[in-house]
Amino acid sequence: MTEINRRQFGSLAAVTAAATLTRSLWAREVAAQPAPGRFYIALVADTHIIDDFYVKGSENGVEDNTSILVTTPRLTAARDLINSLSPAIEQVFVLGDYFHNYPSADYDFYFKNTTRLDNAKAITDGFRMPVHIGFGNHDYDVHRVPREMSHRLFKAKFNANPYGSLDYKGCRFVHLNNLLGSTQDNKALEFNPSVGSLGEAQLHWFEAQLAERKPTFVFVHYPLMAIRDTEFSDYGLHPLLRKYQDTIRLVVTGHVHKWIDFAHTYGPQHYIMASTRYDPNAYMLLEIDPARGSSRFINADLVEWSTHYSKPYRAEERSAPQLNH
C-alpha cells in the first residue's frame, strides 16, 4: 500500500471531521427548496488511483509527485462524504482518469496481479449508489497500449463501455469519450494526444441521443476548448452542442484539475471541475429537477474558482445556490 506522512494524515483527518458537519447540513440545504421529483447526483473527476507498481517521482514537480501518493485516501474521503448525505445521492459519475497510466502493456498482467484498476474499483465499489465510469487520457496509453486493449480491460474489470448513456427519472446522462477520434490514433496523420476528438460513429450516436429531446447532462474528460470543434466538414461536437443547447442542461468536464466556469461559451452551461487527486472536497453535488429541466449546483459557492480547491461542504457558509436552465 502507498504510505502517507504525518502531515498528509492530519490533513485527511481534518477532512473527515468536516464531513461530520456535512451530514446534517446537507439535509437542511436540500430541504430549503423542496419539490416532488427532484433527485441528487454527484460528480468526481481525475481520481488517478495508483498501485504498488507505481514508480514514485514519475510526475512533473513537487505538487504532482506529492498528490499522486494520496489519491486513494482522498477519493475515499470524497466517497464517504457522498455516502453520508441524506437525502441520498442516487447516482455517481466519474469523469475520467479513473486510474493513473498502465504499469504494463500485457493484457494478462492485469489478471495475474492486483493493479491500480482493481484498487480504483475497490474504492468505488464502496459507494452506496450506482457509479458510472468515463474514460480519460490516463485510462488509455495511446502511445504504447492499443485502445482496443483498454476497452477490453474496462469491460472485463468495470463492465464499462467506451461511451454510453443512462436514462434516469426522465433525464439522460451521457458519457462521451474524446479519445476515439483520429487525434488519438497513433497511426493517423492528425495524431495529437493533447487534442480530443470523438470520431464519426460516436458523433452520430450522440446526435441520435440528443434528437430524442430528453433533458440531457453531458460528461466528457477533456474541456471543450481542447476538443476539435468539427471533425468531418462542419460536423463535430461544438456544432452539436449549439444545435441542441435547449436540450442539453449542462456540460461538465475534467482533465485540467481546476474549477473553471465557461458559462455559455459553447452553448450550454460548461464547467470544468477539479480533481480529487488534489482535493478530497473536489466533488460536484447536483440537484436535478426533471419537471423544470433544471439543475442546481449545490456546492458552487464553496468552489475556489481557477484553483484545485473547494471548501468543505458547510451550509452555514453558503449564499444563494446557482440554478442552471
Image: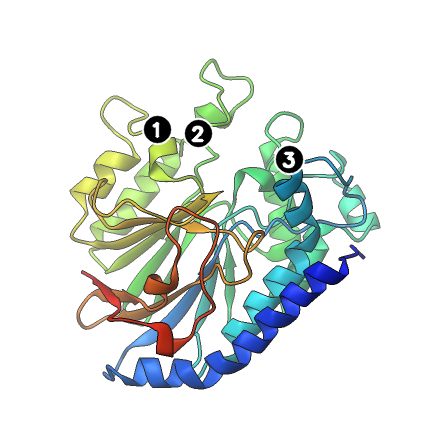
- In the rendered view, tell whether residue 222 sits above or below residue 16: above
In the image, taking residue 121 as reference, residue 226 lies left or right, namely left
Q: Secondary structure at mark 1?
A: loop
- Are circles 2 and 1 on residues that touch, CB within 8 Å? yes
Which disc is residue 61 wearing?
Answer: 3
**Where, quadrant-wise, is the N terminus in this rendering?**
bottom right
Which badge, 2 or 1, is on the more N-terminal residue? 2
Which badge, 3 or 1, is on the more N-terminal residue? 3
Q: What residue did someone put label 2 on?
A: 181
Say which residue appears at 43% left-offset and 74% top-offset.
90
Q: Secondary structure at mark 3?
A: helix
Give the tally of numbered discs: 3
Q: CA distance from mark 3 to mark 1?
A: 29 Å
- In the rendered view, tell whether residue 212 sits above or below residue 182: below
Foreground: 253 or 180? 253
Which badge, 3 or 2, is on the more N-terminal residue? 3
Question: Which of pointers 2 and 1 indicates the residue nearer the eye?
Answer: 1
Q: What residue did someone put label 1 on?
A: 228
Say which residue appears at 68% left-offset and 55% top-offset.
70
Q: Is residue 128 visible?
A: no
Residue located farthest toward the top when viewing the structure as drawn: 189
Kind of residue sitting beneath label 1: Arg
Say which residue appears at 59% left-offset and 37% top-offset.
140
| Residue 211, image x, y percentages | 21, 49
Say which residue appears at 76% left-offset and 46% top-offset.
110
